[in-house]
Image (tube, rainbow, N blue to C red):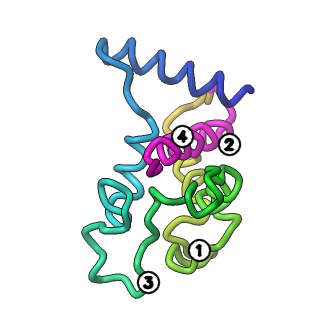
Amino acid sequence: MRVAALVAAMNCVAVRIAGAETPDLGKAEFRDKCVVCHGEGGKGDGSVLDLLKVAPADLTVLARNNGGVFPVDRVYAVIDGREAIKSHGGREMPIWGRRYLGETTEAASYFVDMPYDMEMFARVRILALIDYLSRIQEK
């Protein structure tokens, strides 16, 4: 519940700053972290496809491949690094791994007094990405 409230608050702040329509934080995370391998539409047809030994998954069929239910827990575990995906690299030197937490810790170094919990910030980014992935599922 706290995470959902934090996501909502971040969206409100972003709207006030932008003065425009509500930004899609999940879509922005996807474009920043996933598009190069999974492609703009999440089909596994990213720009580095020819360079990969293992083709990226089609992220639009996760629900279909799970009996029509989007597998939130498994997707979360893959993104935060608890569930290893061979093509995402090892956890010691990952393409993913604990990337979100590392990035938020790096961001915190720019501030003297961080007003929020860095792990919570990482969770919000992951949940926004999961929300976006759930919205691009094939019907």
Magenta stretch encompasses residue 66: no
Q: Position of residue 25 (x, y in %)?
A: 44, 35
Q: Which numbered disc covers residue 119? A: 2
Q: CA distance from mark 4 to mark 1?
A: 20 Å
Q: Which residue is mark 4?
A: 131
Crowdedness near tag 4: few (<14), some (14–19) or many (≥20) residues, C-alpha within 10 Å: some
Q: Which residue is mark 3?
A: 54
Mark 2 or mark 3, whichever is nearer to me: 3
Q: Earlier in the sequence, mark 2 or mark 1?
A: 1
Q: Earlier in the sequence, mark 4 or mark 2?
A: 2
Q: Which residue is mark 1?
A: 85
For the residue pair 76 and 93, the one nearer the viewer reads as 76
Query: Residue drawn at (32%, 18%), measured in percent from left and top?
Result: 21
Rendered view: 108 above or below 18: below
Q: Identify which amino acid the numbered label 3 is placed on.
A: Val
Q: Position of residue 97 (x, y in %)?
A: 60, 65
Task: State the SS at label 2.
Answer: helix
What residue range appears in magenta? 115-139
| Badge count | 4
Residue 89 left/right relative to 50: right
Query: Residue drawn at (49%, 38%), measured in percent from left and top?
Result: 110
Q: Position of residue 137 (x, y in %)?
A: 47, 49
Please say if the residues under marks 2 and 3 sit with CB atoms less than 8 Å apart: no
Query: Residue drawn at (53%, 45%), measured in percent from left and top?
Result: 134
